[in-house]
Amino acid sequence: MSTCKKARAEATSVVSSDRLSSLPPEIKGDILSRLNAEEAVRTSTLSSTWKDAWTEMPVISLSDGNLTRTKFVTLVDMVLLLHKGPIEEFEISGSKNYHDEFGRWMIMLSRRSPKSVTIKLNSGPKYKIPSCLFSIGDLESLDLKNCIISLPRAFQGFKSLSDLSMKIFSSTDKDIQNLISFCPVLTYLRLKSFEGINRLNIKAPKLDYLNVHGDFKDINLDAPNLEMASLFLDNKAYQSVPIAHDKECYCLSEGCIVTKVPAVFTRLENIYLTICFWDQRQVLIACSLFQNAPDLKSVEMWSYPSSTWDQDQASIQELTPQMQMDHLVTASVKWFRGLDYEVEFVAKLLSWAPALEELKIEWEGETDRSMVLTKLLALPRVSPRAKIIVT
C-alpha cells in the first residue's frame, strides 16, 4: 500500500472510532443491548469512552451458560449494582442453584422498575418470588419459571401488565385469582404445569389469548374479549366450566350443560383442546366452550387416552345437546384411534356445522383402519361442502 493510501486508511479509522466513541450514552447502551451482559461488560476495556457504556443498557440478558457459579453471581451483582440508566427489559436464566442470592437480586432489580421481567432459573426447588417484585408498578410483561407465587397482602396489582406467563409454579386459588384480576389490561395469559390450584378463576376483561395446561378441578372463565383459547385438560381431574358475563352466570357443573347461548366469547375464533372423548365431563366442557363462542371458525383437538376409561358411561350421543356452530369452517382431531367415542364426536361435529369445509383426522389407531374409515365417510353431514380427510 502506498504511503498516501495508508495515511488515508488510518485517518478514516480514527474518524470512525471517534464517531462511535462520541455517540450519546443512551445510543451506546442501546447498541450493547444487542449483546449478552457478559459481552457488554467486556466492552469497557475497549477505551475510556466505552468504560461505563454498558451501564446505560436498556435491555439486560443474563445467562450462566459456561460461567462458573461464582463468576455468574459476581456478574449479576455487578450489573444490578452499577447499572445507571433505566431498565426496559431484564432477563435472567441459569441451570445452577442461586437460592441464596435470589432475594438480593430481586431487591436490587425492583429498585430499577423494569418494564419487562423474565426469570428462568431451573435448578433446585422452586424460587419464592419476594414481595418486592410485586411492587413494580410499571411492569408490562412478566415471565416466570420454577417459582412459588405468594402475593403480599399489600399487593395493589400490575396496572400496566399485558403479558403474563408462568410455567412450573406453585400457588393457591386465591393468589392466582387476585393476581389475574388485579391486572386490568392483561391480554396474554399462559399457565403451565402448576400445583396447589384446584379452582382456576380467570377474570380478565381485556384478555384475548389464553393457554392453560395443568391439573385443576374447576375453571371459572370471564373473558369477553377472548380470541384464542388453548386448554389442555388433565385426565386426572374433573372440570366444570362456569362462564360469567355481566350480571348473568352461565354454568356447567354436575353433568349439566348450559342451554342458553350468551355472546360471551364474541371474538373467540380458534380453540385448541386436549380431551378424553370417553370422559363425559370433558366432553361437556368442550360443548360448553363451543356453545359460548358463536363466531368460532376453527377447532383443533387432541384425543387423549385415559387409563380409567369407564365402559359404562353414557354415549356422547346421549350426553350432548343439539347445537349449531354456524361459523365453523375447519376442524381437526389428532391422535385419533378409531374408537366409538371418537367417531360419535366426529358425527356430532358434522351435524353441528353448516359451514364446515374440512374435517381432518390424523390416524394413530391400531384398529382396522379401513372399517373405521368406512364409518367416517358414511356419516351424515349438514354442510354439503364438508370433506373428511384422514392422514
Image: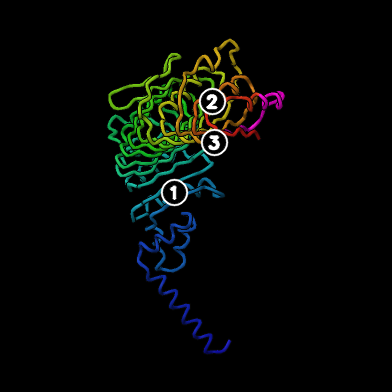
Of 131 and 293, which appears nearest the observer?
293
At 49% from the left edge and 18% from the top edge, which residue is drawn? 320
Residue labelled with disc 3: 357
- CA distance separating discs 2 and 3: 23 Å
Of callouts 2 and 3, the N-terminal one:
2
At 46% from the left edge and 63% from the top edge, which residue is drawn? 43
Of callouts 1 and 2, the N-terminal one:
1
* Residue that lies at the very extreme toward the front in this rendered image: 384
Image: magenta residue range: 359-374
Magenta stretch: residue 369 in it?
A: yes
Of 137 and 295, which appears nearest the observer?
295
Q: In the picture provided, is 151 more to the left or to the right than 231?
A: left
Q: In the picture provided, is 377 more to the left or to the right than 200?
A: right
- CA distance separating discs 3 and 1: 55 Å
- Circles 2 and 3: CB atoms closer than 8 Å: no
Residue 76 is labelled as 1
- CA distance separating discs 1 and 2: 44 Å
Q: Is residue 201 above or below residue 23?
A: above
Give the percent coordinates (x, y) of residue 226.
39, 35
Residue labelled with disc 2: 275
Give the percent coordinates (x, y) of residue 268.
41, 35
Element type at mark 1: helix
